[in-house]
Amino acid sequence: MLGLEKKDFRLLLIVVALTMLAPFILNPFPEGSDMAQFNAGYPDLMQRFVIFGILAIGFNILFGLTGYLSFGHAAFLGVGSYAAVWMFKLLSMNVIPAILLSVVIAGVFALIIGYVSLRRSGIYFSILTLAFAQMSYALAYSVLTPLTGGETGLQPKPGDPRILDRALEPGETATPGLFGLFDMRDSLELTVGNWVFTFNAGYYFAAVIMIIAFYMSIRIFRSPFGMMLRAIKSNQTRMSYTGLNARPYTLAAFVISGMYAGLAGGLLVSMDPQAGAERMFWTASGEIVLMTILGGAGTLIGPVLGAGFIKYFENIVSKINKTTLEGWFYWLPDGLEDLVITVIYPFVGKGWHLTLGLLFMLVVIFLPGGLVQGGQKIAAAFTRKKPDDAKSSATEPAE
Amino acid sequence: MGILEVKGINKRFGGLQALGDVNLSVEENTTHAIIGPNGAGKSTLLNVLVGKLIPDSGSVMFDGQSVLGRKPHEINQMGISRVFQTPEIFTDLSVLENVMIPCFAKRDGSFRMHAIESVFAEKGIKAQAEAILDDVNMLERQDMIASSLSRGDKRRLEMAMCLVQDPRLLLLDEPTAGMARADTENTINLLKEIRQKRGITMAIIEHDMNVVFSLAERITVLAQGTPLVEDTPDNIKGHPKVREAYLGEAQV
């Protein structure tokens, strides 16, 4: 089907089903209940799930296949964002030209950075990409202010030419849309009993693009090109003594993954049309690495899971505050309640990084293959009859 | 005129003259062994041939073209394949994939962007890879991950990866180093078979005299970076200079 092996096609169908039904799946708790704050089915967060999913899918093409750990991928995300906002300012609020420009500019940027950085491998490559990304951040923050808006960031403003639409009136704001068909902020709400489900245009737009991006990544993984990238990770000496030039292969992978990041950047500003330099900061690059490793580097679905996992923590666990905890543990005896809250408090709210860090450590130590390996272990435990199958799927690198 | 002509190669590492005026001619369709005591410059010479080291002076011609200054992958594309002392294979990939990669390299050259079509749509490449695995008796192990193979099988796999490219010259760097007796015999037989069936020209660097005398048709003896003699195995065995420099300690 669609040029995919049966197993891959099934995986694609699962991803399609999950993304299309996400407004239901992510909103399991009724409105107003104690658990409602664990609902993730609101547009802003769902958009982040799929957009950062695209980012991680692209990063995985580089890191998962070739093993080259780029520590500067946020630069491409940032460049993509700026490019898209400029399109909003100059052309129109239509997202299509904006996203196309994001991808192209990020690709060109990746070609330049990749050409230089890929002269080295291992830690030196990581450091070079990190240096480039931090340089980009510093430039965007200061010297390039006319182009990037510096500290205040870049957003559409009254007075922008916007040659295909019209200039905004003072005080008017604009939201990005698709050929005037719909606005990215348009939402439909469906109320069933106590449940409220939100279907957001922007989410579905980004989700369709993520599915296409995911499909493309499966094709790349299963292609001769993907096999060459895995060969580079495995043994570069044999690669060159087999008559293959590793450089153009790694550069192509770098540019493709940079374009994915640019696409994600363009989508981010399509949902919320403002871009800031902090999007290129090194912690943002680190987050991409975390997502991929947490989910399972080199696996097809892992990076998407990792991205969802981290974004869920960032937005849900960080919202739990002392009052919420008191609400949960009010039934405990007074002294014990205080003790429990004191123990838990550092791990939630602003301390969500601590929880995430601990989880990351547990995954890396016990599940080096990431969440995907965890899933495989659980699946294997349920199908003990066929241990051979479980073993072969666990060793398959591109599962 | 041999297929490989090495003329007047000099290579210095600081104060050490690793290779001094080395001349070597490998005739097409022969097995040529290069032997010599430790530190004679055998490995340095091999690294010059495959483009890993650039000599200070001299020339290396392969089939009328200079190989000097070319990168390893370019030299491979000219038709020179190399088997390493420790087998260099793609350990994380399956046995079949290991052999398919050189097939792609042979067909598509050193780089081609074929990112959309599936590997398994490449029926011709797969058939080619399976045929060579059958030749080295590894067809039933094609789905194994290469790192889980035994040492001897890794060597066979590496050999298959070189052979599937149909090289004009196969360079072997101590192909039996560190092998058990039985594995050594297997390797010798495999190489003999390759030689007879495919008529591939081979240059072997080897320590083990048993291997050298069972395979080589011509032998060059290297000592202190300079060729002492080049002759047939029978003449080498009795050569006084060689005995003095090398075989005296090996007791052949």
Image (spheres, coloured by chain):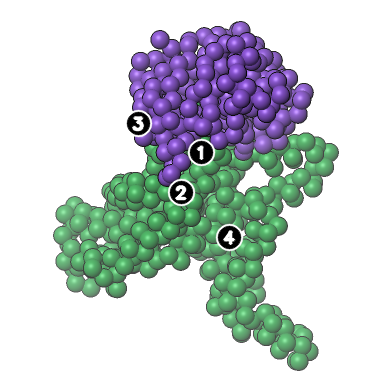
Chain colours: A green, B purple
Q: Position of residue B61 (x, y in %)?
A: 38, 20
Q: Amino acid at mark 2?
A: Ser
Say which chain tag 3 marks.
Answer: B
Q: Nearer the observer, disc 2 or disc 4?
A: 2
Instruction: Residue A58: give x, y in percent of width and height.
Output: 46, 48
| Mark 2, residue position | A121
3 or 1: mark nearer the eye: 3
Mark 3 → mark 4, Cα distance in angstroms: 60 Å
Determine the chain carrying the residue at label 1. Answer: A
Quarter holding residue B13: top left
Q: Residues within 10 Å of mark 4 (few under 14, many from 20)?
A: some
- State which mark lies toward you, 4 or 1: 1
Q: Are marks 3 and 4 on the same chain?
A: no
**Front tag of 2 and 3:** 3
Foreground of the two, B222 or A28: B222
- Left/right placement of residue A345 relative to residue B202 reads right
**Residue B57, labelled with which disc?**
3
Chain letter, disc 4 residue: A
